[in-house]
Image: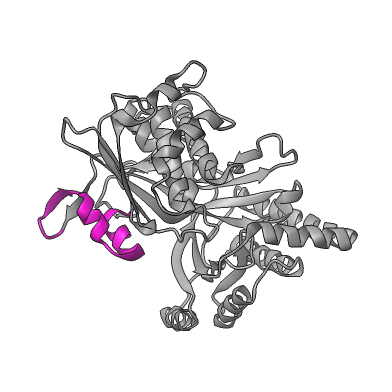
Amino acid sequence: MVSAPGKVIVCGEHAVVYGKGAIAAAISLRSYLLVTPYPKPSRKLTLRFADIDLDHSWDIDALPWDAFSAPGKKRYYFDALERLDPQLMKALKPLITNIPGKVLQAAATSFLYLFLMIGNKYSPGATYTLRSTIPIGAGLGSSASIAVCLSAALQIQSGTLTMPFRGMMPQETQLQLKRINNWAFVGEMCIHGNPSGVDNTVATGGKAVLFKRDDYSAPPDVTHLKDFPELPLLLVNTRHPRRTAEQVSNVRNLLTNHEDITNSMLDTIDKITNEANDIINDPDFSSHAGSPHIVRLGELIRINHGILVSLGVSHPKLERIRELIDHAGIGWTKLTGAGGGGCSITLLKHNVKEETLKDLDDKLTAEGFEKYNTTVGGAGVGVLWPAVTFSEEHGHDIEIGQEMFLKVEGVQGVESLVGVDSHGKRKWRFWREWVSEDNGGR
């Protein structure tokens, strides 16, 4: 089993479109991919993604191997692809035409493109079962999280990726992460066409990144924030669909009609991002109760939201969430991502009373919002091999089977069975430059 996180924009959205900086961070909501081999001599390949009702199988021998292995077409695990091959995409079309809906077809295309590139015609038959605790279509990087899972799992199967272990040299860790990220980006291209690459980078490496993109004909400038602290976060989904292009257009129109004022707001967002980055990288940074660093970071988050409101990219539902949270006095809130719906994030204050959170939860639920208690700044891609969990009932480890994995319900069910924050019940391992003594080498 492999797992990778979703992401939120901590600060800088919309300003980043105009060459400013933005900070994106991993959240503890994650995708999980269970790989179960078929018994030999089966040549069957199955993708089961219960959250979007995708369950489809292919015959491995009937896949277009000739097209993908033709001269100039085949790429290898150490390659980095900047664009998809139109002829190879065309070769995949007959394999997805009987799958209903563009979302399911895009997911299947991403899976097959990676399978045919990373694997070979002798790859064993297997079922790839996906579960996600990340709200889909809410701007939280769910597709990138899945692409990272597929990339890592397929490379582990092909023998081109080394399992993370205690004492792995930093340069080897970075090489492994680069290979996972490169192929996850290919998966993202299959779904989004021209992704920024930021979502899959955060899902691969975890923690957070500072990114800028001055030239859209070149990759973004990405700086990994390895010291980003893991902080408590309240994520609330408005359940109102967001339209990124529409919100970007709103800001562009405002810039056309009020150039000086809008540029001033975008410059201020950039200053917020830079100051947040300075706070996070302060050698004396502290997240303890009443820490001036947390208070300062929270104030920047609140100011950032106010500017985004002025840019016209908020939504009444987002403002209602902020109103309820502000009234509860539990933290600092802003929209995250494109706005116009989607999600809000709240950096929580310390020592918030349980009854206060319960009262807020009741109010949010009553108004149709979805609340997730999560953290920001956690681990990136990880692997659980063998895929086993400790059973209180049996008193020993048991194998995580497909039906067991599919049977559990909701975020709590998935996290209880396979979650990376397992307090020793599961031995998740992560590719990163340091390890701790607990949780099996995290």
Query: What kind of colouring is applied to the model shown?
Result: one colour
Check the image and report above or below for 134 versus 35: below
Between residues 137 and 73, which one lies in front from this camera angle?
73
Residue 156 in the figure: left or right of residue 237: left
Check the image and report above or below for 125 versus 254: above
User: What segment is highlighted magenta in the picture?
Assistant: 392-419
Check the image and report above or below for 339 versus 173: below
Q: What's the residue at 42%, 83% (across, down)?
A: 355
Q: What's the residue at 10%, 56% (across, down)?
A: 394
In the rendering, at what x and y percent does residue 135 appear?
Answer: 46, 61
Can you name the residue that lies furthest to the left here?
Answer: 394
In the picture, which quadrant includes the N terminus? top left
Residue 74 in the figure: left or right of residue 406: right
Q: What's the residue at 15%, 49% (across, down)?
A: 398
Magenta region includes residue 395: yes
Q: Is residue 168 visible?
A: no
Between residues 313 and 332, which one lies in front from this camera angle?
313
In the rendering, at what x and y percent does residue 87 appear?
Answer: 52, 29
Between residues 108 and 379, which one lies in front from this camera angle?
108
Magenta region includes residue 76: no
Between residues 332 and 21, which one lies in front from this camera angle?
21
Can you name the residue that lies furthest to the top here?
Answer: 71
**Count the marks: how many?**
0
Q: Is residue 314 visible?
A: yes
In the rendering, at what x and y percent does residue 289 appear?
Answer: 52, 67
In the rendering, at what x and y percent does residue 227 appear?
Answer: 54, 46
In the picture, which quadrant includes the C terminus? top left
Q: What's the residue at 48%, 81% (across, down)?
A: 360
Residue 396 in the figure: left or right of residue 412: left
